[in-house]
Amino acid sequence: LNNDTMFIFQFAMEGFLNLHWARWQRVLLTRSIAIAPTFLIAFYRDIGDLTGMNDLLNAVMSLQLPFALIPTLTFTASHKIMGEFRNGVVMNITIVLLSILVMAINTWFVIDFLEKYMTHQWWAYLLVVVVALFYFFLIFYLVLYLIVTLNVTCWCPTFMHRLIGIEENQPTLTLEFGDSYSRI
């Protein structure tokens, strides 16, 4: 599962970040982000506690999943990228709901892991809060981009475009709902 997640993460983030780097630099960055946590856990954890190491690796992969899943949803919903092969409305709704369910279950798993293995000291809680705020800010940005792609910007679309860094006269990733009801 980690290898599949790593490749999905790599390709999705390469395209989503729109990096204009040499291919080897993009691969090095995205692979490092995907594999570094697993390597550090395997290197620094006690080999005698394989159950704890497995739980920690699962928690890390749960945290990485939205960074592969949300850009993949954004790309497959995009008329600009997928053309006539983009997902239909019913498929988008189904995929978004299933993704929310999977990410909620993973969030519960990470919280359960933290409650079980975290030391009860103030600095540990502070560190978790700071990292969680940064993590959810990044997820929030990806979700905003997905919302713009799905064309669900009924409240203040100008604000949404400015927030994610797209000018209004610049072509955006939009999903046209006109004939897509018949496709699944």
Image (tube, helix red, strand yellow):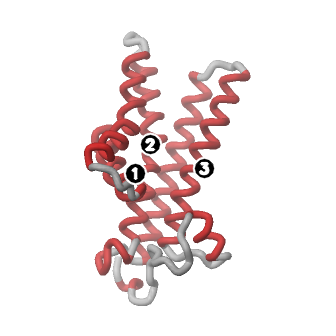
- Give the residue displayed 45% in from the left and 57% down from the top: 70
Q: Which residue is mark 2?
A: 64
Quarter-wise, where is residue 76 in the image? bottom left
| Left or right: residue 100 compared with residue 77 | right
Nearest the camera: 96 or 70?
70
Percent position (x, y) of residue 119? Answer: 64, 19
Look at the image and tell me whether residue 95 can be seen.
Answer: yes
- Badge 3 element: helix
Q: Which residue is mark 1?
A: 68
Q: What amino acid type should be assigned to the residue bearing mark 2?
A: Gln
What's the CA distance linking mark 1 and mark 2? 7 Å
Asked if labels 2 and 1 touch by Cβ distance under 8 angstroms, the answer is yes
Nearest the camera: 19 or 10?
19
- Give the residue displayed 60% in from the left and 50% down from the top: 137
Mark 3 / mark 1, whichever is N-terminal? 1
Vertical placement of 122 versus 129: above or below? above
Q: Residue most toward the right?
A: 122
- Give the residue displayed 51% in from the left and 46% down from the top: 105
Quarter-wise, where is residue 163 in the image? bottom right
Q: Which residue is mark 3?
A: 137
